Amino acid sequence: MTLRILFFLGWLGLLLGPGGRLAQAQQPRELAQLPRPLTLPQALQVAQANYPALRARQLAVRAAEADVRTNRATFLPQLTAQAQALNATANQVRGAYLPGVAFSESGAVKATGPDGRTNFSSLGVLAIEWPAVTFGRYRASETRSQAAVSAAQADYEQAIFEYQAQVADAYLLALGSEKAVALQRANLARAQQLALVIRAGTRSGIRAGIDSSTANAELARARLQVLAAEQQARTQRTRLAGLLGQPTQAVQLDSMQFYSRLPLAGGPADTARATNPLLRAYRQRIVASQAQASLLSTNKRPSLNLLASTWGRGSGVRDAVDDKGNFVIDSSPGAGLPFKAYNYMLGATLTWRATELIHSGRAVQAQRLRTEQARADYDQQALQLDTQLQNARLQVELAQQTALAAPTQLAAARQAYTAARARYDAGLDNLLVLTQATEVLNRAEADQALATNNLWRAVLLQGAASGNLGGLLGQL
């Protein structure tokens, strides 16, 4: 007994332990490590593979495809088998009754009236029913189910596209925050270098003591700007990691020379209505609604079913009666369960529900109104996309002009800083002038990076409005 208990506990430990099957089943799905560094195309692939909302849309497509197979199966021949064995009384009276919770009686009307004797009876049935002619109902049902698959697929593609645009924008924002950190660190390095020079001049008596205090204040401010930029960068990286479905992993971005060149701003032609996945999803909803209306209209048509059945019956009630007209009943199972009579049936049934002319007509009318509603929703989305596309083009034009003008500002700021630093080192200007020149240079560097990042984001906005991100991804 002790060995059995130890064996059982050991087997249970294997199942529930760290290496057991039950423990493995309870563990969450492990995600692959993010590439380091992470490029934008890689980020889009990771998001599509890992984000739960996209997997849910993909499963919806698979469910719609399974519904197609289920729908086809409903129009196949249906084979039904039944077997029963009963022990019941064999009483019957003349008259009619309404079928409901009562069961059909066995036997026939006896001359001497009912009694309480029971007998065994058996029944075995094999039946085939096939809706051979549906008068268009099968084809309409097939079209409706296929339209549902297309609608689910369009919704999935639309979700992928919108999410790719969202991930790309989050990537560019995170990249912009990383660039801001680099610029603020460069500004901190300038402040540290200047502070060292000023402290040395203060100790030697060349510089006034106020210059040292001012330099220390500017150095502290530069450190605070670095901390603020790093905090913003961490926030943007965390947001991007969450969109990638891996919020616990650290994201290391790849600049891909985003700040070394400007993107081509030439957008696509007026293709928003033709290629935008959102409009495609709305068009498929219209098609699915039309297919549903066609299916409802087939309900007013008849249906022709082919039937075939064979069955056998056994009973403990004998066919002959005694000299008093009573049935001879044998209550033993051996007398009632074996089959004694066999039958078969072949035929066809034509069914037409005349009232469906009214019901289906009203249902079709309601469905057509839903179709018109879907068309109105499509027109509304198309109008919004046209407006967004026009706004995106204006944003691209403005961002392009800003990005082209920013280098001039940066060059002038660098020249002013170099001149102010030289004049301060020569003793021709005070520290206030140099501090202002440093601030102008820092702001010009930030404006240059922001202008470049805004142009990339404007190109992304234009691609999202036109339904095609190839203009952005093709330049990476």
Image (cartoon, rainbow, N blue to C red):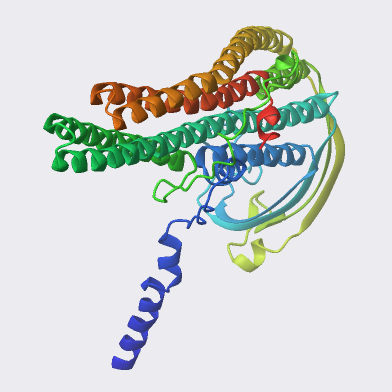
Residue 349 makes an appearance in the image:
yes
Q: Is residue 63 above or below residue 342?
A: above
Q: Quadrant of residue 178?
A: top left
The residue positioned farthest toward the left in the image shown: 209
Q: Is residue 103 above or below residue 436?
A: below
Instruction: Report the label total.
Output: 0
Relative placement, left or right, of 177 versus 352 is left
Q: What residue do we see at 66% from left, 34% from top?
A: 473
- Quarter of the image with the N terminus is bottom left
Give x and y (percent) for residue 374. Answer: 64, 12
- Viewer-closest of 447 and 109: 447
The answer to whether residue 321 is visible is no
Q: Position of residue 71 (x, y in %)?
A: 73, 36
* Rendered residue at 21%/36% (across/down): 220
Query: Which quadrant of the figure contains the C terminus?
Result: top right
Foreground residue, 69 or 52? 52
Question: Percent position (x, y) of residue 159?
Answer: 59, 30
Q: Residue at x 64, y 68 (%)?
A: 334
Q: Quadrant of residue 123?
A: bottom right
Q: Position of residue 356 (x, y in %)?
A: 71, 14
Q: Is 372 located above or below residue 335 in the figure?
A: above
161 or 234: which is nearer to us? 234
Say left or right for 272 vs 255.
Answer: right
Left or right, 451 with reference to 337: left
The quarter of the picture where residue 349 lies is top right
Left or right relative to 204: residue 84: right
